[in-house]
Image (cartoon, rainbow, N blue to C red):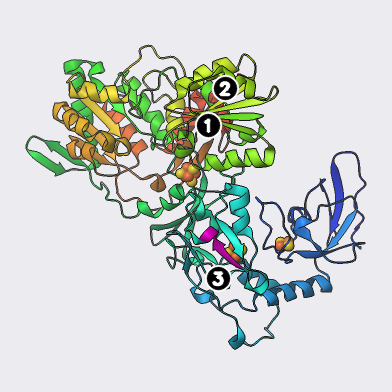
Amino acid sequence: MAADTTPPAAPEDGLVGITIDGRTARVAKGTLVTDASAILGIHIPVYCAHPKMDPVAVCRMCLVHVEKMPKLQPACATPVSEGMVVSTERADVAKTREGVLEFLLLNHPLDCPVCDRGGECDLQDFAFRYGPQASRFPITEKVHFNKAVPLSDRIELDQERCILCWRCTRYYDEITGEKELVLQERGVHTLVNTFEGKPLTSAFQGNLPEICPVGALTNRKYRFKARPWDLQRTKGVCPTCSYGCNINIDSRDFEIKRFASRDNPLVDDMWLCDRGRDSGPSWNNVERIRRPVLRDATGSREVSVSEAVAAAARSLREVRERHGPSSIAVLGSAENTNEEIWLLQRLARTALETPHLDHQLEAFPDIGPEEHALGIAEIEQCAAVIVLGDEPEREAPVLTLRLFKAQTKRGVAIRRVVAQATRSLVGELPAEGLIGLIADETNREHATALAGELSRSHQVRRMTVTRGVNGRGAKDLGMLPNSGPGYTAVDQAGKAGRHILEASAAGLITGLVVMGGSVWSASVTPLLERVAAALEVLVVIDTRPGPLSRAATVLIPGHAIFEKGGTVTNMEGRVQRVRPALPPATQTPSETRILSALAAELGAAGWPGDHLLINRELVTAVPAYARAGNGGRALFEAAVRA
Ligand code: SF4
Ligand code: SF4
Ligand code: FES
């Protein structure tokens, strides 16, 4: 039976009926033909079109036939209309595609065997799928341009591979607003170059090789490191800050070769900052702690994991018996997963019975969920956003791109405020609509005062840019001296991070457990030397050697974030999974298993050690995490009400 190609009737639902290659659908009015065809599973090749940029229709690769139109139309710039009938398979469409590809390949070098993009190149793929069988032009007559032109210490341009799609220059115009790349000359002589020949300085230039559809722009740090088919890809979360950009961890031979972006429109919107992107390979060569060690006045010796755990428990019990539970403290870090944090705070509160616990050195007074109400994507829905100081964007660089998008594409007024709260600010804000207020951990007090002032006239939603990949999760789950899991009240407030170290140096705390402290320890090395000299027991679980591990009486190797499973929570409360991408550098069991074994030695048997079982326990205890699930936001009651 012949397929019914009549587009469905048009009810008043804001949708329009369209037929592409005989398949029908109803899609939102204004949808581009390329997007509608993707919904129907029909492939239309594109070069200049990019999902995050406005259409310019310069490459003509996407030309399709639209019924009742005299010429082929660019699908990337043609919005659907009611009853539109499109063909992507007609002979004239196929012939035009062949022509476009033949033209693009005219002077294109035969570089595929040595091009970094080979294997993931749209020119290679489309030439194979839609291109002519053979070129009508002799290979010896190709016009050559400059190769390997450095645009900065990160990016290299191969001018003869460029197909002039303009994506890179539009990226600078539309996404970062920095205008560092330009098109020079005209016609066949057109070339991409940096503005006035100056090197690129953007903190987001690492995105260029990903948006370039061919191998014209390549990453100098990744050049010739691997072929796409040699890479093992694992979904992950950038470990460098609390923004939580989604990444693909590409590894080869048990080494991270690159971080590639993984589009999450609610978080990164497909972009990574260079700091995060470049951090990937730095994990390969770091010195690691590999074996458990016991240390006393006579020296140090390697031991088994069970000996180390038993020795840690024995010494902590002795300290508790001699000086009481308040003489013990527990410090974690913003690099611990949620499951590790869950057990670590439980170890402190129930097995060791101490109120002194924290995950960072800086105190976090008056913490509450109301400072975490604003989501990253919600920035675009605000009437105005106030950013206190420049630290939030330095802490979480991709936030800058979201703010720029909100301003340029959604008309959100962005105000950067450095001075203390002023009444004049209120008068400058739009009378209607939501006001976003973004602060970092150092200016929370200012944010609280300003939010109080603004909330008399406006609806205000706050965001605090936390530090470290899981700084937010550590706070949500109560790795704090003044707040329990889910921001519940605690019976007795304990000492915050730096006060714990100072009390240890003064001999008031005599037993200390530290997990992942190498993240913050380098900044307090002199204090740590005094701490180490004064403590009776220092139990350290860590990945990298440092002042803490060198002073530990019991040292147990930990796992880098790419070597374990679990979840981390970004600064807006989005709970995201991390998965093992590399084999562990140590044979020691995971941190969660070590903590559960330590609790058992301390008399608290039956704690789960597997991260999935721990997660089940924590979502039962903290309903906001149950509601968040995998990939959603943990919203606490006060935040939901805000
Ligand atoms: S360098 Fe790449 S992104 Fe830029 S115009 Fe050329 S092909 Fe397009
Ligand atoms: S903004 Fe943060 S999470 Fe995103 S890529 Fe940069 S460092 Fe990584
Ligand atoms: S992708 Fe449509 S014209 Fe370039």
Dot 3 surroundings within 10 Å: few (below 14), some, or many (20 or more)?
A: many
Of the numbered discs 3 and 2, the one sitting upstream in the chain is 3
Question: In this rendering, would 78 be left or right of 608?
Answer: right
Question: In this rendering, would 71 be left or right of 292?
Answer: right
Dominant secondary structure of the residues highlighted in magenta in the image: strand
Tell me which segment is drawn in magenta: 191-196
Going by the numbered disc 3, the residue's amino acid type is Gln
Give x and y (percent) for residue 305: 24, 41
Of the numbered discs 2 and 1, the one sitting upstream in the chain is 1
Secondary-structure class at tag 2? helix
Of the numbered discs 3 and 1, the one sitting upstream in the chain is 3
Give x and y (percent) for residue 408: 65, 41
Question: In this rendering, would 81 be left or right of 634?
Answer: right
Q: Determine whether label 2 and label 1 are within 8 Å by CB.
A: yes
Pick out the residue farthest to the left. 298
Secondary-structure class at tag 3? helix
The answer to whether mark 1 is within 8 Å of ligand 2 is no
Residue drawn at 26 percent across, 29 percent down:
513
Going by the numbered disc 1, the residue's amino acid type is Gly
Pick out the residue farthest to the top. 491
Tell me the CA gap for discs 3 and 2.
51 Å
Q: Label 2, on which residue?
A: 639
Q: Label 1, on which residue?
A: 573
Please tell me which residue lies in front, 331 or 590: 331
Q: Label 3, on which residue?
A: 159
Residue drawn at 27 percent across, 38 percent down:
522
Please tell me which residue lies in front, 530 or 291: 530
